[in-house]
């Protein structure tokens, strides 16, 4: 039996097949702490949504690889205790090396992303193929990437974007055997997606590139990274209560909704959770300066993230009730 199945996780193959046919996207939520993980699980239980719990390499270093796996396993047990049987995958986000992906496969992850997008094309194929060959022995799904997203998020740093070249996608998928493909069409990591002058609209995502990729890869799952909306109310709250975030600009949610009606089967959200939590914590501490019990402000962060995730699932991704 594949190790991830012992823990109650699923890989992404059936998830993405259902999402593709149902024209919705599976939410892939990054977590960095217990409160964020609880917010994710509670939101998905309330909405009956399948989901992907994502850990970056930096998070595995921060709380320990064993703790990440045990916490994810506890998520499944929590759902079972609440009478819920919701498909959940545990995914490595932005794995940069074969050894890192191998470690996750061996420890019970059900999905890994290998990011060779900044490498020369042939090197990207070589690295991705090596990960696929190992992961598929254990029925673990693999996400590859073509094209480069700009921005900074959890150790992933790229100064400039490079759109995915549709002419390469067929060869890349065939040569590597990946199960899904992350592409670059204008989304970006971090809280500053693009610097705009006041009143200027956010540029349209390159749906023409996405459309061409769909033609070349029919029925193949596509992934969007860097899709956080960076909601102005959270930015304003952070700045109101002592923070300093400048030029914050997210992806318009109307464009993300449009993407869910295409071959996009997985959408990553990290920064939106971070700013919601930060806004809630700052507000509690500024309004209650004598508070020292972490539960007082961390519970506020958990609730704010839970509400955010529920709204994303119901109104943006369309995955509510798809468990």
Image (cartoon, helix red, strand yellow):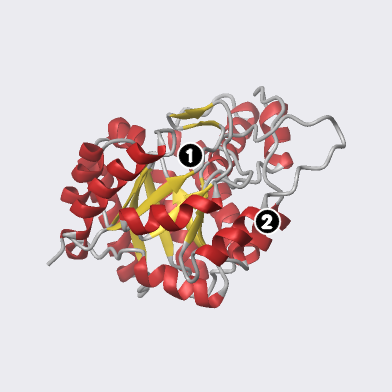
Q: Which mark is residue 159?
A: none
On the rendered structure, is 44 left or right of 315?
left
On the rendered structure, is 76 left or right of 48?
left
On the rendered structure, is 204 left or right of 28?
right
Q: Which mark is residue 298?
A: 1
Compare marks 1 and 2 and give the one earlier in the sequence.
Answer: 2
Quarter of the image with the N terminus in it: bottom left
Which residue appears at 52% of the width and 49% of the height?
A: 183
Which residue appears at 72% of the width and 57% of the height?
A: 254
- Image coordinates for residue 147, horizontal then vertical, percent: 51, 42
Is 270 placed above or below 21 here? above
Residues marked 1 and 2 touching at CB (< 8 Å): no
**Mark 2, secondary structure of its residue:** helix
Q: Residue furthest left?
A: 1
- Image coordinates for residue 240, horizontal then vertical, percent: 72, 28
Viewer can see residue 178 = no
CA separation, marks 1 and 2?
42 Å
Is 217 placed above or below 194 here? below
Q: Which mark is residue 208?
A: 2
Is 209 placed above or below 283 here? below
Picture mark count = 2
Q: Tell me the mark number nearer the camera, choosing from 1 and 2.
A: 2
**Mark 1, secondary structure of its residue:** helix
User: In which quarter of the view is residue 307 placed?
Assistant: bottom right
């Amino acid at each position: 039996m594949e190790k991830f199945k012992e823990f109650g996780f699923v890989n992404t193959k059936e998830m993405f097949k259902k999402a593709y046919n149902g024209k919705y996207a599976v939410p892939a939520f990054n977590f960095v702490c217990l409160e964020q993980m609880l917010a994710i699980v509670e939101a998905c239980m309330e909405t009956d949504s399948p989901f992907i719990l994502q850990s970056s390499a930096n998070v595995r270093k921060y709380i320990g690889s064993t703790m990440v796996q045990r916490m994810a396993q506890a998520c499944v047990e929590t759902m079972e205790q609440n009478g819920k049987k919701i498909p959940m995958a545990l995914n490595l986000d932005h794995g940069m090396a074969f050894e890192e992906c191998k470690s996750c496969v061996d420890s019970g992850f059900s999905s890994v992303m290998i990011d060779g997008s900044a490498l020369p094309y042939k090197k990207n194929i070589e690295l991705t193929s090596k990960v696929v060959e190992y992961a598929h022995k254990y029925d673990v799904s693999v996400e590859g990437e073509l094209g480069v997203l700009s921005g900074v998020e959890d150790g992933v740093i790229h100064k400039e974007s490079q759109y995915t070249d549709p002419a390469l996608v067929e060869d890349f998928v065939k040569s590597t055997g990946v199960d899904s493909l992350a592409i670059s069409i204008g989304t970006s990591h971090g809280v500053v997606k693009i610097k705009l002058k006041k009143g200027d609209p956010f540029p349209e995502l390159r749906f023409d590139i996405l459309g061409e990729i769909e033609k070349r890869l029919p029925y193949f799952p596509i992934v969007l990274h860097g899709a956080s909306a960076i909601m102005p109310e959270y930015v304003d709250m952070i700045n109101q209560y002592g923070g300093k975030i400048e030029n914050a600009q997210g992806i318009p949610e109307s464009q993300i909704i449009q993407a869910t009606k295409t071959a996009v089967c997985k959408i990553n959200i990290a920064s939106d959770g971070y700013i919601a939590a930060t806004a809630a914590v700052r507000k509690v501490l500024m309004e209650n300066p004598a508070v020292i019990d972490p539960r007082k402000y961390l519970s506020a962060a958990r609730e704010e993230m839970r509400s955010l995730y529920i709204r994303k699932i119901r109104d943006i991704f369309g995955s509510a009730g798809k468990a």
